[in-house]
Amino acid sequence: MRRQHRASSTPERILAAAARVVWRDSVRRLTLEAVAHEAQLSTGGVLDHFATKEALIQALLARLLPSCERDPEGPPQDAEPGRWTRASVRRQCAPVWPSSDDADLPHAREAGAGFLLAATTHPRGLEPLRTHFQAWQQAIERDGIDPVQATVVRLAADGFGLATLLGLWSPSRPLLLHVLYELIRLTQETPQRCRARTP
């Protein structure tokens, strides 16, 4: 039984190593040799599971879509308007906002690496993701809160996710948590409250 577990986890180990290479060293440094070194395997050990670099990239892209297509779910006790938008914020900000989805973070990093690869080398691979993002936006607009405010929150969370993915900023954790809590607060305002504030 243990031997079977090790064999089945080797591709996961290779994909995690490939993701680290992409995140740390850039897409251009992704080679089978670099991945083998990162995974502490021989190049032949990588080739046993991914015959080409293209096959490795396709496997990372395969990680991207299920991770992004899974609809975010908020806490079961949260049944108020804006629940979907709040869950979306928590999911995008998972690396600094611990949640019950923490166990999925390694796969999320692989999905992020897949995103970088798709954006730079396989743009057509993002087409299903574009379709799903449109469905997300429709859900945001039907979430029971002001659709403009919900969209602002969604764009802010998306921007956070992209900036984190690309390593563009490193704010202090206290500041970041204040920003995230403010995004959550904005999802708790009803359309009536938003209209009352409109000049």
Image (spheres, grey):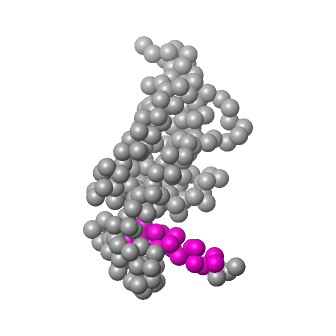
Q: Is residue 49 above or below residue 139?
A: below
Point out residue 115 in the picture as x, y percentages from the top left corner.
Answer: 38, 55
Point out residue 195 in the picture as x, y percentages from the top left corner.
Answer: 50, 15
Residue 166 seen in render: no
In the figure, residue 83 lies in which quadrant?
Answer: top right
Rendered residue at 50%/46% (across/down): 69
Based on the picture, tell me whether residue 81 belongs to the magenta stretch: no
Q: Is residue 16 above or below residue 194?
A: below
**In the visual, does 196 lie left or right of 164?**
right
Q: Is residue 59 above or below residue 14?
A: above
Rendered residue at 43%/63% (across/down): 59
Point out residue 16 in the picture as x, y percentages from the top left corner.
Answer: 48, 69
**In the visual, does 29 lie left or right of 65?**
left
In the figure, residue 76 lies in which quadrant?
Answer: top right
The span picked out in magenta is: 4-22
Residue 136 seen in render: yes
Rendered residue at 61%/27% (across/down): 81
Q: Name, please, the residue furthest toward the right.
A: 77
In the figure, residue 145 lies in which quadrant?
Answer: top right
Which one is in front, 91 or 65?
A: 65
Point out residue 57 in the picture as x, y percentages from the top left corner.
Answer: 37, 64
Q: Quadrant of the N terminus?
A: bottom right
**In the visual, does 84 lie left or right of 134?**
right
Which one is in front, 27 or 12?
A: 12
Rendered residue at 46%/75% (across/down): 49
Based on the picture, tell me whether residue 10 belongs to the magenta stretch: yes
Q: Main secondary structure of the magenta part?
A: helix
